[in-house]
Image (tube, rainbow, N blue to C red):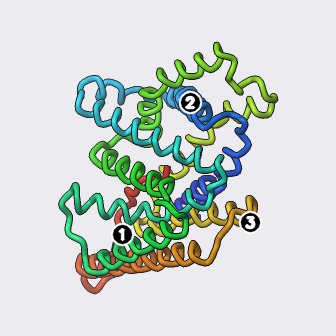
Amino acid sequence: MSDERRGYVYGLAAYVLWGFFPIYFKHLQPASPLEILAHRVIWSVVFVSLLLAVVRNWGFLKRLARSPKLLGGLALAAALIAINWGTYIYGVNSSRVVETALGYFITPLVIVLLGVTVQRERLRVLQWVAVGIGTVAVVVLTIDYGHLPYIALLLAASFGSYSLVKKRMSLPPAEGLFVESSVLALPALVFVGWLTVSGDAKFGNVSATHTVLMIFSGLATALPLLLFAAAANRVPMVGIGILQYVAPIIQLAVGLLIYHEPMPPARLAGFALVWVALIIFTFDALRRRARAGQTAAGPTAATVEPATTLPPR
């Protein structure tokens, strides 16, 4: 198997795992979303610490100590990913898996908008068309829900902002996850301690299976991230960009086929508009990549650079 094909296997495995996350987090009930989030943070720190200890890769801490700006950026990234994780867990455990899938479908469009408003980037014509169709889709879904699809929008906005912050830093995924989780670990430990003292903690009080699943939420967080990192170094950016739709497609299927969430015609129309926007967006990216390759390579085959796309969560 070639290195690139191996990368696609790693990437597909990562996105499939992310796609089935709703089933995992559903099994963490009756713990509240905040308790699940706190344990996800704590056990992520534990698991990634063990991993870094095994590979003896602690050199990045010296770099962090010398860069207050980098530490500040990672603290902001930690806050954004906590909002993203917490919103996702709340959406799944309040029977809104379909809406969480919508959030990850529209995330690429939100990232494009952030590029325009924050990075002062210029959109191409087809990108404007995709964003416009995506905006119409949000209006249609707002009418259907009777309110803004705030879970989807918060997921997309928090991860889009997280991506923007992370773009300006260069820590590998495992090291980044360790630092971000460590920033959140103290408040998470305080919250878990308060739940334990007040007698409201579900951890250790539901079943042995529930306790084990809560502990392994750290592994469940880190494993797909590490698989994604292995894929990103081997797969072209366009390949990763297409793979990223695997997770929300699976999440949508889980919401509809396993948890039987409703999909009335108006909601289906809104999703259809989102998919049209993403098709246009992806077509534009593929066409631009092909033209860039032809320009760079002349009459020979284009060489595609490794991907640097961030993972979905």
- Residue type, label 1: Val
Which residue is identified by label 1? 304
Residue plotted at (50% across, 30% down): 52
Mark 1 residue element: loop
Which residue is identified by label 2? 38
Residue plotted at (52% across, 43% down): 85
Q: Position of residue 68 (x, y in %)?
A: 24, 27
Mark 3 residue element: helix
Q: Nearer the viewer, mark 3 or mark 1?
A: 3
Question: Viewer-proximal residue, 19 or 50?
Answer: 19
Quadrant location of residue 28? Answer: top right
Residue plotted at (52% across, 63% down): 146
Farthest residue, direction front: 146
Q: Which of the marked residues, 2 or 3, is nearer the chain's N terminus?
A: 2
Residue plotted at (34% across, 81% down): 287
Res 257 label? 3
